[in-house]
Amino acid sequence: MDDYKFLFKVVLVGNAGVGKTCLVRRFTQGLFPPGQGATIGVDFMIKTVEVGNEKVKLQIWDTAGQERFRSITQSYYRSAHALILVYDISCQPTFDCLPDWLREIEEYASSKVLRVLVGNKIDREDREIPTHVGEEFAERHNMYFLETSAKESDNVERLFMQIAEDLMKQARTRDLPRYDSNAQSINGRTSTIGDSSCCSKLQ
Amino acid sequence: MGSRIRENVKHFFECFCELVPPCQDREPWIIQQFPDKYRDEEVLKSVPKFAYPCKLENDVIEHYSFVLTDLESKWTFGFCRHDPKAETAIVVLSYLPWHQAFYKFLDTTAVLMHSSRTEDLREFLTAVYNAKLGEPGKKFTVSFNRGESTFCVDIPRPFQLPSIPENRNLTEYFNAVDAQNMMIIFASMLYERRIIFVSKKLQRLSACAQSANDIIYPMIWQHIFIPVLPMSLIDYLLAPIPFLIGVPEEVFKQVHRSEIGDVVILDADTNTIDTPFDDLNNLPQEVITSLKKQLRNKSLGDGVSRAFLRALVQLIGCYRDALKFEPGQKVTFDQEKFIETRPVSLQPFLRQMLQLQIFQQFIEERLMMLNTGQGFSDEFEYELERYTAKSGSKLKQQYREWTSTMKKEGTAFFKSVKDKANPAMKNAVKTVKDGGKGMKSAYKGLRSKLKDNPPPQNGMSTSSHRSAPNSPTGKRRSVGASFAAPVATYRKDAALALRNTAMQRSYSPLSPSSQPITPDILDTPRSSSPPIDIPRIDLMNEMVDLLKFSLDTPPVDRSLKPVRSLENFKTAGAGPSPLHSPGRSLFFPASLGNTSSRADTETLLQSPPEGAFGTACATVSSPPMVPPRTSAPPYMPTTTTKHQQQALLTAKPSFIVGGGHSENGDPVFYVTGGGRGGAVDVVKLTPPVCSPRRKNEETEDLIRLDSTSSDMDDFDPLKSKSSPDSTSSGNSGHVPLSITNPLYTYENHNIQQNGGTASGFQDRCQRNDQDLLHEYGLDFGFSNTNQSAFDMFSASSTKVNSQGQWTKFD
C-alpha cells in the first residue's frame, strides 16, 4: 500500500442510472477493490494520485439504492470531504432532480464540503441538456462543473484530479469540513505502516 | 418502503453451497452448489469470503449468518454452519431472515451429507427448494428421506417481536450484552453512528448485529449493514457513512483505531463499549428511565423487544399528531407540527430525529401505509395505542373520515391497492387480517407456540420436544433417529460433481479413503427412546418445548370443543366473569395457585378429551413459564387480574417438569405438585388426534375469505381493544404488567357461533368487528346477514363488483 499524505473521502450522489458507478470504476480502472457494490450495497474505490509532489489518496464511495430515499439526510454527508452530484446529459429528469438534491446537500452537508456537478454520458448522441445549461446551474449554486463520459473515459481523470487538488488546497488552509470531533486529521504525517494489503492507511 | 427484506419470495432458499476452507495460499471456494442454475456470480464470488471471513477457531458447531446487500439495497441472508469435525462448511442463501429455520435446515442437511444413500441430500434440497411457502404463522413442511422424515419450520408472522429464548439472535445478544450497553447501542443507532461490534465468535457477532437491528423496529437500519465482516473487506470500516458492522476479533486486530475516526465499538465478548458520544444520555430522560425499568423487570418472552418498542413509541409515536388529513389529498407529515406538539424537553431530540434516514424511511413507510388504505396496522401502532389511548382514537376518527372521503370521491388514491391485479377488497381484508395478526403476536406467548412444533409424525420430529431445539445452544438437534447410521467416510453425491479435478486432487479428504469424519449426529444426544428417560433438564427450555409441543395441534381446529376440560376448570376455578364461557381459553383460572390442582391436572392429563390435550398442558405449564402472557381476559374485571397474577407469582403451582416418550411413542410428562414436596408423578398421555387440516389449497390463496371464522379470529385483538371492559389496555400511566388476551373473546365468540346459539353476546362481538373495521377505515358493510358474502367472494372473485358495498374501493 502506498504512502500518502492526504486522504479524502468523496461521496457520489445522483439519480439511479446516471452512471455513478461507471464513473468511479473508470477512474480507478478496477484497481482496488473490485466492486463490492452488488454484495455490500456500497461500492468503494480507492485511488492514489499525485498532486504536486504529494500523494493523495481518494476514497470514493458510491452507495447503491439511494433512490429508495426520498431524501438523503445528514448522516449521508456527515463525513465526506467532497460530494459529486451526477446527472445524465441525455436524460432531462435526472437534471430536473438536481434542485432536490441540492436542497438536501444545503440542508445537511457542511457548507465547506466541496461540491461538484457532473454531467455524465457525453458520448451519447441524444443529448437533452446543453452544456451551457449545466454550467449555468453549477455557477448559480457555486459548484464546480464538468462533463464526462465514463464510457470514453473523457474528463474522468481530470474530474478526480481536480477534486484532489482542491481538497488539498483546502486542507492546507485547514478549511476542510470537520464533522466528527477527532476524525480525519487530514493534514497528517506520512505514514509507513506495514503492507497489509487490505487495510488502507489514514494519516 | 424502508424494508430491506424482499417481498414475494418464491423459494425457501436461493442457493445451497458447500465450501472448502482456505489452505496455505489458496482461498476458500465452493465445491458444490444447489441448484446449479443459480448463477449470480457476484454473490457466488462473495460467499467464500463470508463463509471464511478470517481464521476460525471453533471447537463446537457454530452457526452464524451474514448479509449481502444488492444494488436495490435489499438483503440476502447467508446462513453458515461450521462443524469443527467437518472438512467443509455449508452455507444456504435466502431472501428470508428466518434464522431459526435456516439453522435447522443446515443441521438437517449436515446429517444428510453423511447419509448412506447419496441421493438423499439432493432429494432433500430439491424437495425444499420446490416446496411452496405458506402463510405467515403456519408451518413450512417438507417430507424427505422417502417420506420417512419431515422437515418442518415455522413461518414467522409479520410484525412478530423477537422473544427470548425462541429467537436465537436476541437470546445471544441479551446474554452477551447487558441492558445498559444494549441501550447505548440502541441510542447510537438512533443517532446513526458508525458502529462496530467485535467478538471472537462469529455466531455472537451476527446474532448481536441482527438483534440490534431488530430492536429498533419499526425503524430499519438503512445504511451499511455487515453482520460479519470478512478480512478482505476491512476497508469498509473507513466508510464516511453510517454503518453497523460486526468485526471478527481476528479482523479487528488488523485495524488501526486512529484510522477509523469516531466510531462506537461494542466488544460483545467482554460486554464493554467504547464510544466518543453520549447518545444514551442525549435521549429524553423519561424515556431512558422507563426503558431501564422495563429491562430490569423483563427478560423472558418478548419483554426485551417490547421494552425497546415502548421506548420508540414514547420517542416517535407522536408522529401521528403531525399527520395531516386533507380531503382529496394524500396524507402528509408536517415536520414542524411534529416538533411543536411535543413537550419542550423532547424537542431537541425530535429535531435531531427528523434528520435521520431511519426516521425518514419510517415516516415514508407509515404514509405509504395510510395512503394505500392500510391504516394503522402493525405492532408498533398497537403498542402506541396501548400507550396513549386517546390520541389514537381521535386520529383514527380523522383517518376514517379521510378514508371515507377518498372512497366517495372515487379517486385513485388507493390505486396502489387496486393495481395489484385484484380487488382492493382482498388487500384491505388482508390488511385487517395482518393487523389482527400483528396484534395477536402481542400475545404470542401461548398462541404463537400453538403452531410451533408438529406432533410427532415420524422419526424426525420425535426428538423435537425432548430437548430444547429453540434454545440458544440446542438447535443442532433436529437429527432424526430414523436415519440410517451415518457412514464413516465423507461421501459425495455423484450428481453434484466437483467443479474441477484439480480441486479434487488438492483436497484429499474428498476421496473415500480419507480420514473419517465424525458425523454430526454423534455430536448430539441421540434421541432413540429409552422408555422413560428424563433428559438433562433445562427446565425452562424443556417447558417451552413442552408447551409448544402440547399446544400444537388442537387449537387449530376450532370445531373441537374441550368441554370436559373446561368443566374441570370451571369447578376448580375462579372465573367470576359471566362472560368467561366455555371455550378453549388459554388462560388458566385462579385454580393455578390451588394445591388441589394436581389432582385436577392428573385427571385431565389421563383422560384428555380430544382437543383438550393442548389446553390441559398449556394451562398447567404455561403460567410459571411466562407470567406476562397469561394475561387477563378482556372481559374480566381488572381486580381479578391482579389477584391472579399475584397468585401466579407467589403460589407454587403444579407444573410439568419434564417430558419424554414411552417406547410406543406416547408422550409422557412428569408433573410435580408444587406444594407436595416436589413429588414427581409420571403421567402417560395419549397423543392428540390430529385434526384434519386443509393444506395446499389453502396456501394457494393467501386471503381465503371462506374460512370466515378463523379470519374473524384475527380481528379479535382489535375487538378487545374496543371493548369497554378492557380497562388495562389504555393505561398509559404505568406499564401494564400484561396485555389483554384476545383469545378469550374470540373463543367465546367462535364457539357460540359454532353452537349456533345466537346470544346477545354474539351480536355484540359481531358489532365489535364491524366497529373495528370502521375504526380502521375499512368499511365493507357486512353484517350478520351477509357473512356469507365472504364465501361468495372467495368462490368467485369476479363477483366483487356486484357486491355494492365492496366497490367503494374502486
Image (cartoon, coloured by chain):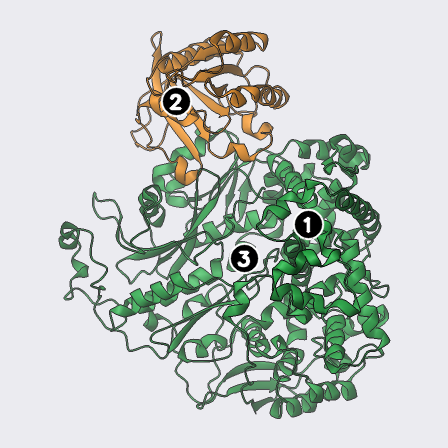
Chain colours: A orange, B green
SS for callout 1 = loop
Of B217 and B532, nearer the camera is: B217
> Which circle marks residue B175 in the picture?
3
Whether callout 3 and callout 2 share a subunit is answered no
Task: State which chain disc 2 sits on.
Answer: A
User: Which three-letter amino acid code belongs to the residue tagged 3?
Assistant: Asn
What residue does disc 1 label?
B374
Of A145 and B600, nearer the camera is: A145
Q: Is residue B132 left or right of residue B448?
A: left
Of B469 and B85, nearer the camera is: B469
Q: Is B233 above or below relative to B60?
A: above
Task: State which chain disc 3 sits on.
Answer: B
Picture coordinates of residue B301, whole percent (x, y): 62, 63
Picture coordinates of residue B150, whole percent (x, y): 42, 73
Q: Is residue A74 left or right of residue B403?
A: left
SS for callout 3 = helix
Q: Is B245 above or below relative to B481?
A: above
User: Which three-letter amino acid code belongs to the residue tagged 2?
Assistant: Leu
